[in-house]
Each structure stands twice: as structure tokens, then as C-alpha cells.
Amino acid sequence: MRIKIKVFGLFLTFFVGTILILTFLSCNASGKTNIKIEIINYKGWDDAYKLSNETVEVVVVPAIGRIMYYGFMKGENILWNSPVFLGKSLPAGKPMIKNGEIIWANFGGDKVWPIPENEVKDINGYRWPPDHWFDGSAHEVDTIENGIKITSPVSEYCGARCIREIILNQTGPEVTINQTIEKVKQARRPSVEPINFTIWNVSQIRPPLMTLFNLNPNSIHPDRCVMMKSNTINNFFVVGDIGVLIPDEKREQKAGADSDFWLAAIVGDVVFGEFFHLQPDTDYPDNGLSAEVYTEPAYTELEILSPLNSLNIGESMHFSIIWRLNKLSTDNKTDVDKRAAAVGWLNSYVE
């Protein structure tokens, strides 16, 4: 694998058992080194990239095109990893096949889908699973300042590719994810052109205590939120401007909102916040939803969607999000206390 190094130096190469670890140190303007980038074996995937500072670690697995680890140093992984697919990968250029049928290789972690769910069948030729060129195929990787960039193959379905820059802040738990979809060629089915793309960021996390929506006071929806599966209402409630969805231990659920600023979950004693900006006067997928949560017994998905954008060949669209973590105080003993503390912290970043 060719690696483009855009950092000040390669300081150390060493073996740990049979694993070759390359360490790159990224320096800030003062010359002080805070970010470490290592190539490791992560749960059976060689050539995984671990980014770390003194606070958190992030692991990106280019072999399956996604982030698979995010958590405090010496803490637990916030992201869910499927035990069924550890160390596995897709056949080059092909989806996973079982008993003659295409199946979803649900690796877990965080990735991007490129089109609204209701258009998948027309564009891909089947309703499910998602586009494997984006979700599961091996991505090219380059190192950049304080992070790495991964680039998907060009999808034979929609004719586009995804480029993601994953950048760790010099200090603290903040991760910036700059995301681009580029239209490279015509879709496999010319009749579906022009395609309305969305940068649909999907973060699969371990089952949380609760997920939190920042409800829009100027929402286009009467209840400021939408129950996307009928049984969801049993575990959804609103407190002021906050929508709360509690995972169900037996059934799947889904809810969405035209939220601004953040979508979040409390996982154990840690608040995981995904921060973004709602873009007014634009069209969003799923009848105007910018944030969605899907829960099932094994994991929960936090889903952030960009506005829809019709791209011609050679055009691109961009959408950035920021991840942050906050550990709750032991003084927050009840669910109500934890929710209040989480919301207070999340809203401290609202501009």
C-alpha cells in the first residue's frame, strides 16, 4: 500500500509480535507533538489507522471504509462493532453474497450512504442492502495533517464516490469529519439521472441509555418530530425542546426530526454528541429530516443527513460534522439528572 505522508516525520518503526506499527507524529505550529498516527491490526484488519492524542483514540479501517473505534483513552468504544464480521471484508468490487442473494455486511462503525432510502431500489436495482461501494468496500487512504483521508471506489450504481477527512483535534475529544461526494460518471441506469444525493452519515453505537434530539422550534413538522416506525411512540417523549428516544430491548424503532446543531446519545456514563448545521431553505431527505435515530436490540444508529443536491458529472457536495465526548459526573445518578447534564453540555456548543 502506498502511503502519502504529509506530517513532519516518520519517527519510529517497530514490531509488536507480528504486527508492524508505523508511528507518524503530527506537529502544531509551536513544534509540540500531540497527535499520534499508528498503523495497527484492529480486530483482524491489517493496516487500520489509530489516531490518538492525550484524551481519545479513533480507529479507521480503510479495508471496509469506516471508523470503527472512538472513545476516551482507557475507556470503552462508543461505536458498535459486529462480532459476526470482525476481520472480514468484501470481495473486491462486489457485495457480499450468501445463498445466492446479496446481503448487508453490517460491520458496524461509522460510514456514509449517498442517496435517500426511498430511491435505493431505482438506482441500485434492489431495495436493500445499501450501496456496497460506499458501505463496505476498501477505501484508498492518505495521511493528512492531524488525521487521515479515505476515498471510496466510484459506485457503479450512482457514479459517485465519497471522500472523508477524519481529523483529531490537538487536545480533547473533538473529531472533525469533512465529507465530500463527487459525481464521477453516469449512473448504471441512465434513466435515474439526475440523482439527488445526500451525505447520510450513519454512526452505529453500542446500546445507549437514551438518545436525544434537539427539536427545532421552527419545525416544519407539527410535533417537531416524526415517528418513522409505528411502535416508536411507546418509547419516545418530549421534555421542553428535547426529544428522548429510549431503545427497546426487543423491537426496532426509528424517529426523525429537522434538528439543528446536534444529535446525541448517552452510552454508559459518556455523552456522545454529533454536531452539525441545519441549512435553511433547502430540501432534506425523508420529507425534511436532518437527524434520525434507529434502534434495535444490538445497537443504535445516529444518522445525520445533509440537504439533497443534484450533481452533474464533475460536480461535488460537502458536509462536515464534529464529534465530541463528555463524561458525566458521578453526581448524576438518575436518568433525569444524566439527561439534564447531557443537554447542558450539548447546548454549550450551540452558536
Image (tube, grey):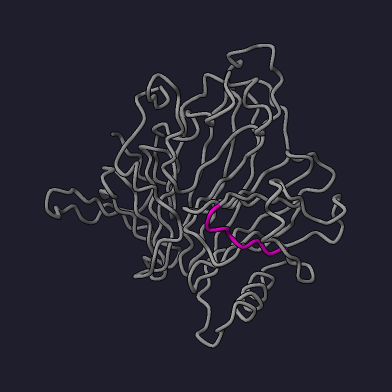
Q: Is residue 62 magenta?
A: no
In x, y percent, where is residue 18? 12, 48
Q: Residue furthest left?
A: 17
In x, y percent, where is residue 42? 29, 50
Q: Where does the N terminus fall, quadrant-wise?
A: top left
What residue is at 37 percent from the left and 61 percent from the top? Answer: 52
In the rendered image, the vertical position of residue 217 relative to residue 151, given as above or below: below
Q: How many marks?
A: 0
Q: Nearer the viewer, residue 91 or 334?
A: 334
In the rendered image, the vertical position of residue 92 relative to residue 276, given as above or below: above
In x, y percent, where is residue 92? 35, 24
What residue is at 59 percent from the left and 22 percent from the top? Answer: 158
Residues rendered magenta in the picture? 243-250
In x, y percent, where is residue 203? 53, 50
Residue 63 placement, left or right of 350: left
What residue is at 28 percent from the left and 43 percent from the top? Answer: 45
Q: Residue furthest top?
A: 190
Q: Quadrant of residue 128?
A: top right
What residue is at 57 percent from the left and 21 percent from the top? Answer: 126
Q: Residue furthest bottom?
A: 331
Residue 134 placement, left or right of 181: left
Q: Where does the C terminus fall, quadrant-wise?
A: bottom right
In the rendered image, the vertical position of residue 317 relative to residue 10, given as above or below: above
Q: Main secondary structure of the magenta part?
A: loop
Residue 44 placement, left or right of 67: left
Q: Nearer the viewer, residue 113 or 278?
A: 113
